[in-house]
Image (cartoon, grey):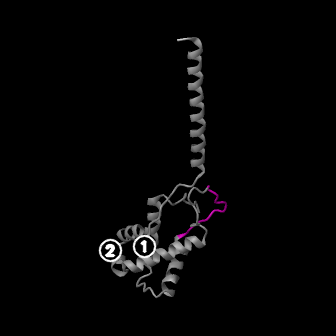
Amino acid sequence: MSAVLVFAIVIATALVFAIAAVIIGREARRLDSVAPRAVYELEQATKFVADHLPTDTQARLTFAELRKLLVFHMRWLHDQGLQPSGVVDRRQDIVDEVVIDEQTLTAFLLDAAEQNNIEILDDVDVVHVVKAHLEYFEAIGAVGPQSND
């Protein structure tokens, strides 16, 4: 082999490596800045929450009532700006810290149940629904860090 051919092969190899490194680095940086995809499926969430409720609560709430409570919860999250539309490949741009406390959410769901004629026999049932629903969010990776307050 001539020295020119060896030199051309070395240059071509270095060029291919440089192009690959730039493309992979750019994609890694882009993916790092995009919010992770947490997919919420209502049927899966309803089953998960139902399975994680205490037996007494399971006996007092129907599957349909539980599903409605979860829909109310998701609407509340949307109203708080935590369920924006168009989140696929969206950069993480949450500027304001949003803290969800279980008491506020429980009060909201109790009010929503009353307004929509869902009979809640014991208020603690809604507390259990909130806790189990938040556990579902954690299970799918849709929860941020815990607040120290």
Task: Write down the residue under mark 1.
Answer: 128
Q: Quadrant of residue 82?
A: bottom right
| Residue drawn at x 39%, y 79% as measured from the top left | 64
Q: Secondary structure at mark 2?
A: helix
Q: Closer to the camera, 20 or 31?
A: 20
How many numbered callouts? Answer: 2
Give the residues drawn in magenta, as a range. Answer: 91-101
Residue at position x 60%, y 28% in the image: 15
Residue 33, labelled with which disc? none
Residue closest to the far top? 2
Cα distance between the residues tagged 2 and 1:
11 Å
Question: In percent of the image, x 60 and y 23: which residue is there?
Answer: 11
* 57 vs 2: above or below: below
- Overall secondary structure of the magenta stretch? loop
* 54 is within the stretch colored magenta: no
Vertical side of 89 occupied by 65: above or below: below
Per the image, the residue denoted by label 2 is 55
Task: Kindly identify the residue that appears in the image at 44 percent across and 70 percent down.
Answer: 42
Residue 29 coordinates in the image, percent (x, y): 60, 44
**Residue 132 percent coordinates (x, y):** 43, 68
Residue 51 position in % (x across, y down): 35, 69
Q: Secondary structure at mark 1?
A: helix
Closer to the chain start, of discs 2 and 1, is 2
Q: Residues within 10 Å of mark 1 (few under 14, many from 20)?
A: some
How far from the left and from the top, in percent, is residue 149?
A: 59, 63
Label 2 is placed on what type of residue?
Answer: Thr
Determine whether, in the image, residue 96 is placed left or right of residue 107.
right
Crowding at mark 2 (Cα within 10 Å: few <14, some 14-19, many 20+): few
Asked if residue 146 lies left or right of residue 125, the reply is right
Nearer to us in this view, 122 or 133: 133
The three-letter code of the residue at mark 1 reads: His
